[in-house]
Image (spheres, rainbow, N blue to C red):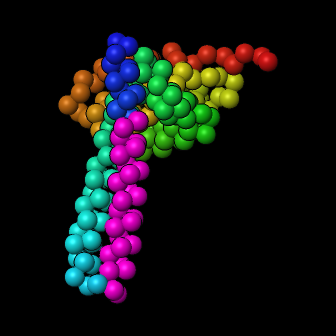
Amino acid sequence: MYAWQIDRAASELRELRHEEVLDAALAGLTFGLAITASELARSFAVPLLVGALTSIFLAGRAFWRHWDLLDRLLLERDAYRINEVRRRAERSARMTNRQLLAASITRLLAHPYCACSARVLAEAEELEALSRELDDPELILDPICAVACERLLREGPSPLFDEALPAGDTGVRIRQIRAGFERRHAE
């Protein structure tokens, strides 16, 4: 990513977060006014309720757009200069999340029929090794690799779950994730 793209993405994230908060506050205010109007001036209650529902919709749309942009930026290493993106990726690399990912791999290996079983079975050794590394507190996982691991293990555009993607991508992605581990330095 170019610097101007990062600046634009950071600005858009801030604007969308601001839009979420304002729309949610407006929805709360108009909903409160609609309730009050239902007791004091019934003719205003319905328009205020429509306004509250519209504000809720707009807040939801802003939330969705914010989440989508953040989700797309998580796989752009240059975007980690944006605090919100970096914090989200670092959360993915925390030990608690890594343990959840390792447990997910264990369940997947125990019940491979939930995914593309041939792909899971073909990469069973690599997946077992990844699971052990995720559980190892002596290893640090690069945040972008932690995000890639989350993407690999969730349904959607993942070669573990989507037969439309090339089967060879599974092993390649697992090896890329495993390459993101390094030994914790003694402090």
- Is residue 32 inside the magenta stretch? yes
The furthest residue to the top: 2
Q: Nearer the viewer, residue 33 or 16?
A: 33
The furthest residue to the bottom: 39
Residue 79 at x, y = what percent?
42, 21
User: In the visual, does 168 lie left or right of 164?
Assistant: right
| Rendered image quadrant of residue 31 | bottom left
Residue 65 visible here: yes
Chain part drawn in magenta: 14-40
Q: Nearer the viewer, residue 37 or 140?
A: 37
Q: Nearer the viewer, residue 177 or 73?
A: 73
User: In the visual, does 42 lie left or right of 94?
Assistant: left
Residue 152 at x, y = what percent?
39, 31
Please tell me whether the stretch drawn in magenta is mainly helix, strand or loop. helix
The furthest residue to the front: 41
Q: Is residue 29 above or below residue 96?
A: below
Residue 35 at x, y = what percent?
36, 79
The C terminus lies in which quarter of the figure? top right
